[in-house]
Image: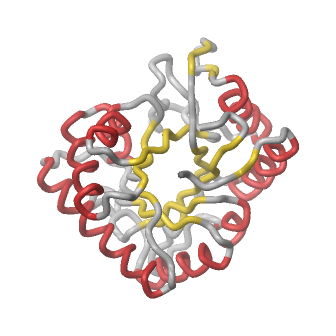
Amino acid sequence: MNRRRIDLNADVGESFGAFSMGQDEHILPWITSANIACGYHGGDPQTILRTVKMAVQHRVHVGAHPSLPDLLGFGRRMMQISPEEIYSIIIDQLGSLHAFAHVCGTTLHHVKPHGALYNMSAQDEEVADAIAKAVYDFQSDLILVGLAQSKSIQAAKKYGLRVAEEVFADRTYQADGTLTPRTSPHAMIHDVKQAVNQVLQIVMEKKVQTINEAIIPMHGDTVCIHGDHPQATLLVKQLHRTLRAKGIELKGME
């Protein structure tokens, strides 16, 4: 992708029942792609419908954000799960989002796994293959979003899927290009200026500074802002304005 163009995505629709998560209504006007929870880690039917409607209102691409079946752990706990079961739960969650998108007059645009499933697919070939095959079998023109330079991207390309290599505004990186585990106190970037500068470094210089201050190559097609980040709204606004001021076009993944 042209280095002067980038997609901004956010994980949204993660509230469940009486429990509110994220700042969706404030974030959606500033992004170009929305990853909407499908009910396995967050998101109930009313939340999903409301979130899809807001995405349509703001002309934001609608994507599925499937997870391991771990509502209590918000999809962030590792699980022993077979490739066959992964395939099935992906199909189930894509079907759910497809239905909501259909009644709202839009279509699914992309798929981005959530939490532990995302991290597993970045490093485990069998997990990555199961997800890619499920996406391909469900709708072969969907874009599969995965950690930049990871096994999830390789698996998607094997099936001929379009891919978007994802980088992060609010997460730190390790020397091997993977994200710092959330169990580390330094996994998240809380300072908005630091997060914006990290994105600028990736988009404009194609590199990133790791947690141990090394500089490694890094390419991204889409930048993630986590909807549950305490300063998500401030971060996405500042990122949007700074990128545009630098002459970088904000455009959905293709």
Kindly give the residue lying farthest to the top in the view shown. 214
Residue 137 vs residue 27, the one in the foreground: 137
Which of the 4 quarters of the picture holds residue 178?
top left
Task: Using the image, determine if residue 83 lies above or below residue 68.
Answer: above
Q: Please state if 169 lies on the left or on the right of 41 as rendered.
A: right
Q: How is the image coloured?
A: secondary structure
Task: Using the image, determine if residue 77 lies above or below residue 85.
Answer: above
> Is residue 18 in view?
no
Kindly give the residue lying farthest to the right in the view shown. 245
Task: Using the image, determine if residue 14 lies above or below residue 116.
Answer: below
Which of the 4 quarters of the picture holds residue 153?
top left
Which of the 4 quarters of the picture holds residue 68?
bottom left
| Total tally of numbered discs in the picture | 0
Q: Please state if 51 lies on the left or on the right of 75 as rendered.
A: right
> Is residue 86 in view?
yes
Residue 245 vs residue 46, the one in the foreground: 245
- Locate residue 4, reporting x and y percent: 73, 38
> Residue at left 33%, top 75%?
96
> Residue at left 58%, top 45%?
222
- Locate residue 231, reporting x and y percent: 71, 53
Task: Using the image, determine if residue 28 lies above or below residue 51.
Answer: above
> Residue at left 58%, top 52%?
226
> Residue at left 72%, top 67%?
29
Quadrant of the image containing the N terminus? top right
- Locate residue 23, reporting x and y percent: 65, 66
- Locate residue 148, reporting x and y percent: 47, 33
